[in-house]
Each structure stands twice: as structure tokens, then as C-alpha cells.
Image: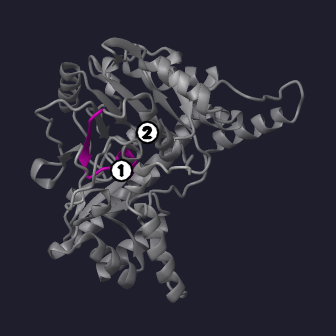
Amino acid sequence: MTQANDNFLKLQRNYLFRDIADKVKAFQTSHPEAHIISLGIGDVTQPLAPAVIQAMHKAVEEMGHEETFRGYGPEQGYEFLRQAIVDGDFRPRGIEMDIDEVFVSDGAKSDTGNIGDILSSDSTVGVTDPIYPVYIDSNVMSGRAGALTPQGLWNRITYMPCTAANDFTPEIPDHKVDIIYLCYPNNPTGTVISRQQLQQWVDYARRWGSLIMYDAAYEAYIQDPEIPHSIYEIEGAKECAIEFHSYSKTAGFTGTRCGYTIVPKALKAYSDGQPVSLNQLWTRRQSTKYNGTSYITQRGAAATYTPEGRAQIQETIQYYMTNARLMLQTLAKAGFTTYGGHDAPYIWLKTPDGVGSWQFFETLLHQAHLVSTPGVGFGPSGEGYIRLTAFGKRQDCEEAMKRIIRL
């Protein structure tokens, strides 16, 4: 008899955002007249930039002619996009990068989940808490998480709480952790990390031989010039960190699907005491399991680095950040305590009077017809909070804030 991967059976039955979708669907079915506004799942609402559309139209046209048609592309991505990434995202920040260290993907979620393929299942894992669920779930699937305790924690995972008491800054472990997940600007709290704090993490990883998985999917939303956009701005990071990027929230590619991952050539793991290149292992993994992002999509992504594309993308980002400012102002007037929203499109709202996350989610849904994300869904330290996103349409954000005031 064929045996299932028992690690999958350890997962909680439903994924957080599926639970939310099911609750919203049930409410909408029983209240068809309700105008529900979603400030929950972080999907974008503004269309692709004109420069992106123009580039994709041109690419589609090319695919219709024999002399310009393209079949399978390189698994790492086309050179025109990888070079644009190096020249546009890293060299302006003083970071030298070889294009062979850039791997184009269909989004950061896929690569953060798949990167564990090249690492030992015996590796220990450390996560900030609260945390994006994929980081933990993918390690459960790979057998690194151990068993779920009665407290809802995995016994082989080191949790680093991020709370108001420590200013949402995770404490560096006092022991070795093989793989550490950091996401900044942070999802879900919307908080950021300083250059000095990030240097401390790099120093820790180099001292213990640890690997940092750095999710920079929201770096384009950073407003403070002192906040680092890439971990590679920190000395020594190429020896201890893999970095993930996405065009989903930067350029509205949530449905188009494109991102990239940086695996430096200086990055090593060990097998039988001998160093092994993680860049080579990831190249081999992608060559085996991935046929590359479509040519049309990569042309669209490359267009975000043109002068016109950059200006248009920045306009959309500021549209969402204006939403965040409007929301923060209203929530403050209503007496709520909030975090984030200044360098990220997420607002971390403390529930009033100690109400639980799911209870306040239900209150907002049933009484104000608003969708949020319960903070406890991101981990135990998220209890007592909800996450709101600024990715909605302006009129919906304004209407949502009016409803919260009335509530």
C-alpha cells in the first residue's frame, strides 16, 4: 500500500486564509444584502502599471511570430530581467551581485516554501512570532517541526516572540538555530528592523554557522531612508543569508506571479563536514522541478525597472501608503492602539478590552461588515491583535473607517 507523507497529517486542518474565506462566504450567504469590505487578505486592488501592460502586450505579439517565438526559457530566468534586478535593486544600494546569484520565480511564497528542499530535514528552525504561516507549515511538511504541543507550538521550532513589550523586536537566541526566518518590513505587524539590529542577526548567523531566510517582499514600501531594504546592505550577509523578493505587492503581480530569490555564491552548507554551495544546489533543484517563469511575465517585470515603470509603480505604492495613513489617523481618533503602517502596508491593531482575535474578527464582520485577519492565526503572540491591510480601494478604506468609528 502506498504510504502518505505523515508530516502533512500533522498540519492543522485548514489554512488561515481559507478559514477566513469560509467564514466570510457563510456570512455573505446568510446576509446577501451586506456590502462586505475586505481589509484582511493582502491582495492588491490597483491595476498593473501601463509600462508593464505595454511590455506584456509586446511580448505576446512576439510569441505569435516564428522568428520571435520562445519556448522553454532558462530555469533561473531570462538574462534581461536578472540584469535589471542587479542594476535596479542592488547596485544603487552599493551591493555587487552576479546575475547567476539571481533566480526568477513565480513569487516569494513558492520559494520560501521550496527552499527547504536543499537543506537537511534535521536542521533546527527559528521563527519570529507572529509569523507568515508558510514559513512554519513548509517546515512541518519537511519534518523539521517535530510534534505540536498542547500550547499550539511545535517542539523543534524556536519561537522568538515579537510583542509590544519588546517593541516587536525578536530576541536573538542564546543557542544555535540552523535556519532563521526574518521578514522585514514585517508581515503581519508592519514593523521594520534597523540596520544595527539586522547587523546583530548577521553577526549571530556567522558566529553559529546559521542560515537566515530574509523575506524582503515589502521593501518597496519603506519610507524611512535609514531602514535597510536588503540584508545584503549588511556586512557579511552574503555568507549567511538567502533573500526573497516579490513583484506581487510591489507591482501588483498577485495574479500575474513573479518574484526572485538571491542565493549568493559565497553561501555554504555542509555535508559530512565538507562545504557545499547552496547556489549550486538551488540551481540543481530549480533545473529539476521548475521550468521557469513565463517570458511574457518576465518582460512585464523588467518593465518595472524602466524610468516610466518606476514612476508608475511608485505612484501605486504611495496610493496604498496614503490609505495606511488615513487608516492610522482614524483608528487613533477612535482610541485604538496600532503598530506598523508607516513603512509597510499592514496595520497591527490591538483589540479593545482584551477581546480575542477571532472574537473581534467576528465583531467586525457581523456588526461592521469588515474583513480583517485574526492575529492569533499568525502565531500565539498574535493573540489580542488583528491585521488590517491598506491594499483596498480608497473609497472602501474611507468607508471602512467610518464603520469602525460607528462601531
Q: In the rendered structure, which segment of residues is drawn in magenta?
A: 123-137
Residue occupying the far top of the picture: 274
How far apart, in angstroms, are the residues tagged by discs 1 and 2? Answer: 11 Å
Type of the residue with mark 1: Tyr
Type of colouring: one colour
**How crowded is the residue under tag 2: few (<14 C-alpha within 10 Å), some, or many (20+)?**
many
Q: Quadrant of residue 32?
A: bottom right
Q: Position of residue 256 (x, y in %)?
A: 62, 46
Q: Which residue is mark 1?
A: 132
Q: Residue furthest front?
A: 1
The quadrant of the rendering that contains the C terminus is bottom left
Please determine whether, in this image, residue 356 is positioned above or below residue 387.
Answer: below
Whichever of callouts 1 and 2 sits on the residue coming sooner in the sequence is: 2
Q: Secondary structure at mark 2?
A: helix
In the image, what residue occupies the spot 15% across and 35% down? 172
- Which of the labelled discs sits on residue 112, or is there none? 2
Label pair 1/2, CB-CB below 8 angstroms:
yes
Residue 361 x %, y %: 33, 73
Instruction: Identify the residue shown where x is 27% and y is 62%.
Output: 376
Residue 82 lies, in percent from the top left, at 56, 23
Q: Nearer the viewer, residue 285 or 18?
A: 285
Amino acid beneath label 2:
Thr
Q: In terms of secondary structure, where does tag 1 sit?
A: loop
Taking the image as shown, residue 68 lies to the left or right of residue 173, namely: right
Q: Residue at x 51, y 55 (%)?
A: 44
Examine the rendered structure and indicate whether residue 131 appears above or below residue 400.
above
Q: Position of residue 225 (x, y in %)?
A: 30, 33
